[in-house]
Image (cartoon, rainbow, N blue to C red):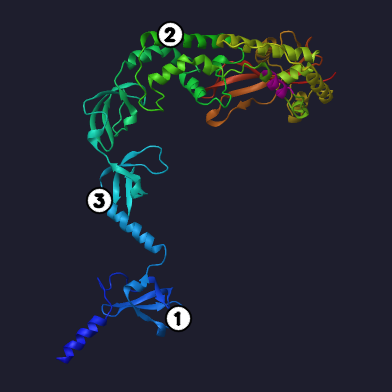
Amino acid sequence: MTKPLVVVLSLLAAPSFAAPCMAFRREQRVEAQKEGQWAKSTVVRCDARKGYLVHFDGFASSNDAWLAEDAIRLPPGVAEAAQKQREAEAAAAAAGYKSNDYVHIQRASDKESFVAKLWNAGPTTYSYMSGGVETRIELADIKGRWDPSKMKYKVGDKVRYVMSGFLPATITAIEAGGYKATITGATDPNVLNEKWFVDEWTYDEFEAAIAPVKKLKDFRLATLAEIDKDHTTQPSLPREASEDSVAEFEKIVRVYEAVDADLKAKFPKLPPLERPDCSFCPVTVADTIARHKEILRFAVPLDPSRVVEEFERLTKADENSYNNDFRPDDAADIFAAKDGVAAAQKKIAKRLRKYTAYGELLGVKVDPNLPKINANIAAEAAKFRKYLKKSPPLLDSFAKEGTAIAVSDKNLESVAKARVAYLYPKSKCRLLGTEKHDWRPEGSGDSYEGRYKYVVFDCTDPEYEFPFALAISAFQPHLGFGKHGPTEGRWPIYSYYRK
């Protein structure tokens, strides 16, 4: 009778465990109670009756102690991580996501959500597959299952495909977060995102109405829209509105005005934007055309001071450029003229006339008064005179190359003379000759354009104080198969010099 009683008493004295040896595992790093303090420790083993045998860091094994579960805890941070993991697993279980589910995903770096197929669906690892590449995500990045019944368009709907214009299309299937469609005028077998479709409307008639704008050579609607996006920088003007093409620029303005009037008459109601960045949509197109004058002002510098500042910046005497052969520019023409200041103001006036004309077309008044730049031009002209040599650098460089120019070639000389007459109608030029050595290649390899030789003249001009050596390139375009086209006079290079 006594022995069973002892057993009962010993069991009552043993530590109590709700689930023996389940809280911690062998060799797990923990913190354990030692003399009233938490000490870094390692679990050695567990006994259902005695509890956990713990080894304290920095102490001999003789100090190992049996401790109850409530005298042991996970290190700071580990417990929180374990709790988050348990919560994530619970959330995953509640969500019920499975591999191959289509879900909405939006990470912190994504501007908008997208639909993708889950590859891993937890409980600890999540990822999706796209284009054969697996990408890891967090559970919080998954914003719910994709529901095909909530898609905007249904199978059989007539829509427009805006990837290449407003092409008629019919939705044939809804899958993988998007649509498959048959498209008139295009073939795309992929699943297409909803943003590439808009509702059916009279897009064909609208496209016909804006066709005159699209037919402009360079100044297309896309160019105008790009200027409208960024007013912080000065866009470069297209070819149609270049320095000597005010008439072309006038045509641009008139085309936009006519199309704007046509749109307002034919399409008083336009379909709403399907998305904020819909550059193809009629609302965006019509708005850009209607505001064309306001937008064009950002492309045309109408402030005369800006024109003159740019002119002065470029009109500088440079000894290095003079000592080398150079092609004609405003600076050299001004500095070599008998009246450099008058020549400068003449060129500025010509430029301001262009901007004044542009301003009138855009309804902006431009002040044509010339700023006082005489002193600056005179000072630069004085520098230029110091750089002039007794012989022309152009001829000097030819001589250094070993290029003789005493050869006569009537065919090349005739086109060169015609070019000189066009460039300098008042000049008197004496032919010095055509260069002797082989043709110079223009371009090389796949970009080979042709070949040229120089024809050189010695010229004087009543508007210039100094004589100048002038070389005209007699150019022959390459026709292929070793053949070249007819000769034409092209770019000039020249240098002024004292006599």
Q: Amino acid at mark 1?
A: Phe
Residue farthest bottom in this picture = 2
Circle nearer the N terminus (1, 2): 1
Residue 73: % across, % down:
37, 69
Q: Residue at x 84, y 19 (%)?
A: 498
Mark 3 to mark 1 CA distance (whole Å): 46 Å
471 is within the stretch colored magenta: no
The residue beneath circle 2 is 261
Side of 175 where 31 appears, left or right? right
> Which of marks 2 and 3 precedes in the sequence?
3
Residue 54 vs residue 355, the one in the foreground: 54
First in sequence: mark 3 or mark 1?
1
The magenta region covers: 307-315
Badge number at residue 59? 1
Residue placed most toward the observer, 109 or 280: 109
- Element under disc 2: helix
Residue 196 occupies which quadrant of the picture?
Answer: top left
Q: Which mark is residue 94?
A: 3
Task: Tell me, for residue 448, which label it has, or none.
Answer: none
Q: Which amino acid type corresponds to the residue marked 3 in the rendered image?
A: Ala
